[in-house]
Amino acid sequence: MTSTDDSPVPDYPGLLRLDGRGFVVVGAGQGIGRQATHALAQAGAKVFCIDNQEALAKEIADEVGGIPWAADARDRGEVEATIAEAERQLGRIDGLVDIVGMAKYIDALETTDEDWDWTFGMVLRHAVLFAQAAGKSMAANGGGSMVFVASVSGIFSAPRHAAYGAAKAGLMSWVRSLAVELGPSKVRVNAVAPGMVWTPRISQLVPEELKHKNEDNTPLRRVAIPADIASALLFFASDLSDYVSGQTLVVDGGVGVKFPYPMEL
């Protein structure tokens, strides 16, 4: 307390803690999902680890003492059954972290209906399905936090993965609308938009020379690793962001505030 301010001071590090809270992680098995699952577990959360590969779900659950579950995140019936099981095993759902997303690289004018539908399923449909199922659960139980992984491809241009960029832009719009609708139920909804992230999958697809090009163009002079994105996801999952909703945080090392933004693959 000072002579002009007697307002209480929170335990700021304590606001990061998630002790006893139940979190559902979609796409937990590798990369950003694996790091996000570790981040939540280290903060004290009980984690329900979802992957479309049963072996990966079990591996990450074993690492963090979580609960493994395999499901197709694009199927409404499987998603609703998954959330019901998560609620049963966790006691209640306090948060959802959804990492799932994948692009096909093809010229915009050559993108087929099948390419478009596949991309929107991999990027947006699962987010809608999990948000609906988990959102109803959280709203009925006093609130919670939902966090989705968006992309700078939904903010800037997305050469040779235009469908992916369109779907990520749709995801960010979905986040904003959910935040307004669910706010009165104390459910916060946010997103993190990474630039290039050197995940195990990307490291197998992207040549080293393009990685170095991105490093040279990044003010922080490195490409993101999955832990960088997991840190931002943890912030939105925790009470440190208790008054933040409907936002998308760009995590790209500062590239988006300069020109040019290299997007070619």
Image (cartoon, rainbow, N blue to C red):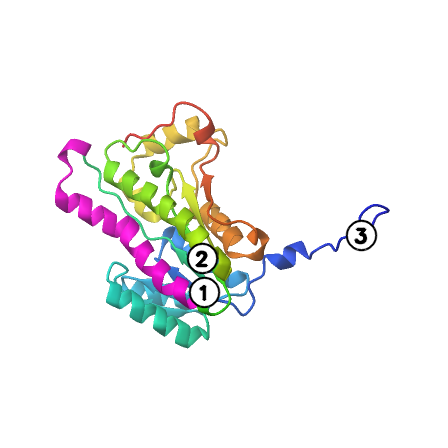
The residue to which callout 1 is attached is 139
Asked if the residues shown at circle 3 and circle 1 are in contact, with their CB atoms under 8 angstroms apart, the answer is: no
- Secondary structure under tag 2 reads helix
- Secondary structure under tag 3 reads loop
Label 3 and label 1: CA atoms lie apart by 34 Å
- Horizontal and vertical percent for residue 258? 45, 25
The residue to which callout 3 is attached is 6
Q: Is 262 placed left or right of 21 in the picture?
A: left
Vertical placement of 227 versus 165: above or below? below
| Magenta range | 108-137
Asked if the residues shown at circle 2 and circle 1 are in contact, with their CB atoms under 8 angstroms apart, the answer is: yes
- Horizontal and vertical percent for residue 86? 39, 71
- Horizontal and vertical percent for residue 260? 39, 23
Which of the marked residues, 3 or 2, is nearer the chain's N terminus? Answer: 3
Residue closest to the eye, 130 or 37: 130
Question: Crowding near pointer 1: few (<14 within 10 Å), some, many (20+)?
Answer: some
**Amino acid of disc 3:** Asp
Q: Confirm whether the magenta stretch covers residue 128.
A: yes
